[in-house]
Image (tube, grey):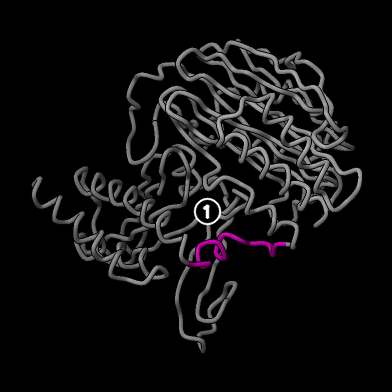
Amino acid sequence: MGNDRRHYVINMLEAAENASPVDAVGAVTRELGAALGARTVAFLIADLSGRALVRLAHVPLDDTGEGRRHDAEVATVLPFDGGPAEQALRTQEVQVVAQPDGWTVLAPVTDRGEAIGLLEMVLPEEPDARALAEIARTAHVLAFVVIANRRHTDLFEWGQRTTPFTLSGEIQRRLLPGSFTCEGSAFTLSGWLEPAASIGGDTFDYSLARDVLHFSVTDAMGHGVASALTATLGVGSLRNSRRRGADLVEQAAAANADVGGHTAVPGSFVTAVLGRLDLRTGVCALLNAGHVPPLLVRDGDSRPLPLPANFPLGMFEGGDYQAGEITLRPGDRLVVVTDGMRERNAANVDLPAMLRSIAGLHPREAARALADAVLEVSGPTLADDATLFVLDWHGGHDEERSTSAGADQARASAPLPG
């Protein structure tokens, strides 16, 4: 059985490598479908709003099927409705549904907590535990196939864009980390932007070193392309100094000089929260440059963190920056938002109460729940960009993670009520 499995995995990887990047996922799913006698196999990618899945298909140009089209590619949006597909992503557990024509299996395609999408299969007979385990493992392999091949094609990005992007949104998209969610042994984090397609000034970023987690949330002044260009300066400077080993104060000073000295719009600036978390001790250094204060959720209560006051990056030449510090305890949640979460109608959301009510959700679902709450009171679109960054501290940096098919089941969100 072990040799058979190894050969099966090798066959899948060879099929993915031999196919073109746009057909690599199809090559892998065909291998699995043939092995299990599946009637249909499909990959559903999560859209960038986090509120739907998108079925990607290649059909002849004269086909009149429904869906968004690009040449011979068709993307059909499947909004979340609380059904098995959404439950599979939320709980990170394989769902099996009896259908008139067979059994539908929905397996999360996930890597380190990033919910990339679902593997959907229709089988003629109810799968046993061994078949379900094989499907779950293949879905995990599929995550790596998508991650590797989306570097070479726009297909997956196009499929995820259920709303056309503005130019500012396009620029901003390149400033974001490659994955919005990450699970480590000691932490879980997730970031969120709203609206994803037209955002122009907000960003979040993170980078994991061996024993340190670096993160930031920034908000460039203004809107549109000018704001996106200012954000590019800010994020580029912060990454550059971070990668040179600079501490938070040095990063802020460099970004202050770079934004102030190079921006095309006089008077532009960037507010920011910069963080450096020691994964061995839980000690988290934080620097607030004119930004909304971070929130700490601890023992059922939430409160803003008092930090030294600093001017925004780029506002004044030669600014003197200071950082603060907090020691996180296992079970703590750190939340950083931009002012789009607090402006106008969005201010009607009781953020501390909301944070308490969603304390049990994985950061991935917690961020979406917060965004949904703001949209509910602000209408379908926000007057200003809104960004969320949610970081859970678990402790145990030296311990190995306990995962199944790309996710830590103990940290996953509970199922939606039936």
Q: What range of the chain is rendered magenta?
A: 153-165
Locate residue 410, reporting x and y percent. Answer: 40, 26
Locate residue 162, reporting x and y percent. Answer: 63, 62
The residue type indicated by label 1 comes to: Ala
Residue at point 67%, 21% (across, down)? 286
Q: Nearer the viewer, residue 243 or 277?
A: 243
- Residue to which mark 1 is pinned: 46
Residue at point 52%, 45% (across, down)? 179
Could you say whether the residue bearing mark 1 is in a helix, strand or loop?
A: strand
In the image, is residue 360 part of the stretch drawn in magenta?
A: no
| 319 to 57, vertically: above or below | above
Question: How would you rate the neighbour count of disc 1 (Cα within 10 Å): few for under 14, some for 14-19, many for 20 or more?
Answer: many
Q: Nearer the viewer, residue 233 or 280?
A: 233
Q: Residue furthest bottom?
A: 62
Q: Nearer the viewer, residue 258 or 59?
A: 258
Locate residue 347, reporting x and y percent. Answer: 85, 31
Q: Specify the quadrant of the image occupied by residue 388.
A: top right
Residue at point 61%, 61% (across, down)? 161
